[in-house]
Image (cartoon, grey):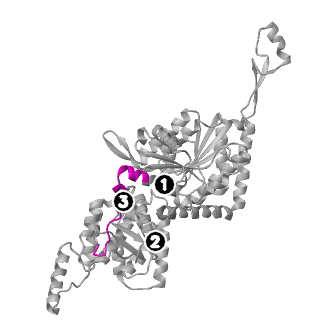
């Protein structure tokens, strides 16, 4: 099976994203039956690397290298590691369950069309039937092996490797080192008896069967034979200046042309990437969705996938367009009512303005110079809104929903003549990318919000800080920021704490994001969150946004819930 270079690079990027690490060469990559990078398995490979540790993982597969049954052991161990990785990470990775079920359905469908009684195939099909919630009809002995094979999610490092070796020893009689020696001695006897010296088993090919597709082993990985090619060159193998330029080129090709001139971007980066965000970079992209003809290779393939997602966003919106339009109408009415109630112009006495003839006598006899009246305009022209969309991979399963929600909020505000600006954010290899879909004055550009797509990580704190800097130039006195987020900050660039570093994730990431939100509130900029995450992330949303967030459980609740949030902020202006 020949794997295209573009698919190899895509597999590498999927593994990097899942591992949260971008400076290693994956020893193993997975592809589907068509030779395309497998989204689910490459994500699992990245998680397993983090769960086991690279050295432990390498030692585990080295332990049965050279055995006659190495391919069997390899695939069985990966099934066990997959189960542990899924159980360990699915609570914190909302997209993982849907990816697993999608893969499991594919496996079951392929098994139904190609029935077999091979132990490995029986176990693999049964395992993924369980993933779909089924009880597979298998023999008692096979069920016993399957139960032992499905490693629990609380094992890590050496404990996970020990569990895998215990399985092979218990059910297949494998003992590291001893089994290889016995097989080699038996092979020597056969060679002497048969009278020739050819090896009875050839080296395993670099690309060989894995699951219901293929696995690629690099030359440095365990089991790679003579057909293994040289490891792919990484971007980090280049000089620092070259790698930085190559990465910026990739980001430009993937996300589109820059919004600002290079010098302006450098100035913003120098101003904002400080403190907890030291070592980070910024890229501001135009979200027009156009694909340049010159874009080729992996970045071009990624960009085309993003364009396909844009079409899926539009199709999903149109499929339920009547309800969406109803929600827009209701939300528009809620916002207008709030404006009528709380944003009425106020007439005050003043030393300048329009002369109030009835008060002229006060100026003559009481020396009161406030004989003029002036209207203080607290109308919609004095209010603008920024909509910030989390576009990290954790939103993968909600892309159509987030795009629709963003569009409905923007369209409702536009109908109320409130200027709105819409931006998405994610992070890739240390760059926080902010994609601008529409600006305040682009009242006909709401359709661009359907260009939303997800990728990479998310450094919420830096995205909010970057938006805060842009709010300094906002055309209105009163400003509201609405975030559509799952309140789960996670980025590869670590935070410096004391003499060491900690991950920008969980409590550290949450606290940093909360700090940036407080900085906005201190400047009297209102911040509200339309929460798109899961139940276990609600405490994080409380920490970051206080009481100014709401979760939309159904489209019928959308207008009332979001409308109440916006009404409360307008009332407090």
Residue 139 seen in the figure? yes
Lateral position of residue 164 relative to residue 100, left or right: left
Given the current orientation, which residue lies at the most extreme front position? 294
Residue linked to disc 2: 36
Q: Quick check: 113 above or below 219?
A: below
Q: Please identify the quarter of the rendering in which residue 19 is found.
A: bottom left
Q: Viewer-nearest of labels 3 and 2?
A: 3
Crowding near the residue tagged with mark 1, few <14, some 14–19, many ≥20 C-alpha atoms within 10 Å: many
Residue linked to disc 1: 251
Given the current orientation, which residue lies at the most extreme right position? 357
On whether residue 238 falls in the magenta region, the answer is yes
On whether residue 557 falls in the magenta region, the answer is no
Asked if labels 1 and 2 touch by Cβ distance under 8 angstroms, the answer is no
C-alpha distance separating marks 2 and 1: 22 Å
Q: Viewer-nearest of labels 2 and 1?
A: 1
The C terminus sits in image quarter: top right
The N terminus sits in image quarter: bottom left
Q: Quick check: 419 above or below 58?
A: above
Residue 148 seen in the figure? no
Q: Secondary structure at mark 2?
A: loop
Residue linked to disc 3: 234
Residue 198 in picture, x, y percent from top left:
20, 86
Magenta-colored span: 224-245
C-alpha distance separating marks 3 and 1: 16 Å
For marks 3 and 1, the one nearer the N-term is 3
Crowding near the residue tagged with mark 3, few <14, some 14–19, many ≥20 C-alpha atoms within 10 Å: some
Residue 344 in picture, x, y percent from top left:
75, 34
Residue 58 in picture, x, y percent from top left:
27, 65
C-alpha distance separating marks 3 and 2: 20 Å
For marks 2 and 1, the one nearer the N-term is 2
């Amino acid at each position: 099976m020949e794997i295209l270079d573009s698919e190899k690079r895509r597999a590498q990027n999927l593994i990097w994203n899942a591992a949260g690490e971008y400076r290693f060469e994956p020893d193993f990559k997975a592809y589907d039956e068509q030779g395309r990078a497998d989204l689910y398995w490459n994500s699992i490979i990245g998680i397993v690397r983090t769960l086991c540790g690279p050295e432990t993982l390498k030692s585990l597969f080295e332990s049965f290298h050279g055995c006659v049954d190495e391919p069997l052991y390899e695939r069985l161990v990966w099934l066990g590691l997959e189960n542990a990785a899924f159980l360990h990470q699915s609570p914190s990775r909302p997209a993982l369950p849907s990816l697993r079920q999608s893969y499991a359905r594919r496996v079951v469908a392929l098994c139904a069309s190609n029935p077999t009684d091979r132990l490995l195939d029986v176990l693999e099909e049964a395992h993924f039937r369980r993933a779909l919630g089924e009880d597979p009809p298998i023999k008692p002995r096979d069920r016993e092996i399957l139960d032992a094979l499905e490693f629990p999610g609380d094992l890590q490092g050496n404990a996970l490797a020990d569990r895998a070796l215990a399985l092979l020893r218990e059910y297949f009689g494998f003992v590291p080192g001893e089994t290889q020696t016995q097989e080699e001695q038996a092979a020597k006897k056969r060679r002497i008896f048969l009278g020739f010296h050819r090896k009875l088993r050839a080296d395993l090919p670099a690309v060989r069967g894995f699951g219901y597709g293929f696995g690629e082993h690099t030359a440095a990985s365990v089991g790679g034979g003579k057909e293994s090619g040289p490891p792919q060159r990484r971007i980090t193998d280049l000089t620092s200046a070259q790698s930085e330029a190559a990465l910026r080129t990739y980001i430009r090709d993937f996300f589109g042309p820059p919004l600002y001139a290079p010098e302006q971007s450098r100035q913003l980066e120098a101003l904002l990437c400080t403190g907890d965000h030291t070592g980070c970079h910024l890229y501001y992209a135009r979200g027009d969705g156009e694909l340049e003809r010159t874009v080729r290779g992996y970045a071009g393939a990624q960009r085309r996938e993003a364009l396909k997602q844009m079409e899926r966003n539009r199709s999903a919106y149109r499929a339920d367009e009547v309800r969406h339009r109803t929600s827009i109408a209701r939300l528009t009415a809620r916002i207008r009512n709030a404006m009528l109630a709380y944003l009425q112009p106020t007439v005050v006495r003043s030393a300048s303005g329009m002369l109030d003839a009835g008060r002229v006598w006060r100026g003559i006899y009481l020396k009161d110079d406030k004989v003029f009246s002036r209207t203080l305009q607290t109308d919609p022209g004095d209010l603008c809104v920024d909509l910030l969309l989390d576009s990290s991979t954790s939103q993968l399963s909600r892309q159509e929903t987030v795009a629709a929600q963003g569009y409905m909020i923007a369209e409702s505000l536009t109908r109320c003549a409130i200027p709105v600006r819409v931006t998405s954010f994610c992070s890739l290899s240390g760059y926080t990318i902010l994609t601008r879909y529409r600006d305040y004055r682009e009242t006909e550009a709401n359709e661009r919000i359907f260009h939303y797509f997800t990728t990479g990580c998310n450094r919420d704190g830096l995205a909010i800080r970057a938006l805060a800097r842009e709010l300094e130039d906002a055309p209105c006195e009163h400003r509201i920021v609405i975030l559509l987020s799952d309140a789960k900050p996670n980025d590869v660039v670590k935070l410096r704490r004391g003499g060491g570093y900690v991950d920008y994730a969980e409590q550290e990431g949450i606290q940093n994001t909360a700090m940036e939100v407080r900085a906005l509130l201190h400047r009297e900029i209102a911040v509200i969150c339309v929460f798109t995450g899961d139940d276990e992330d609600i405490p994080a949303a409380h920490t970051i946004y206080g009481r100014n967030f709401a979760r939309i459980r159904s489209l019928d609740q959308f207008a009332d819930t979001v409308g109440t949030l916006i009404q409360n902020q307008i009332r407090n202006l």
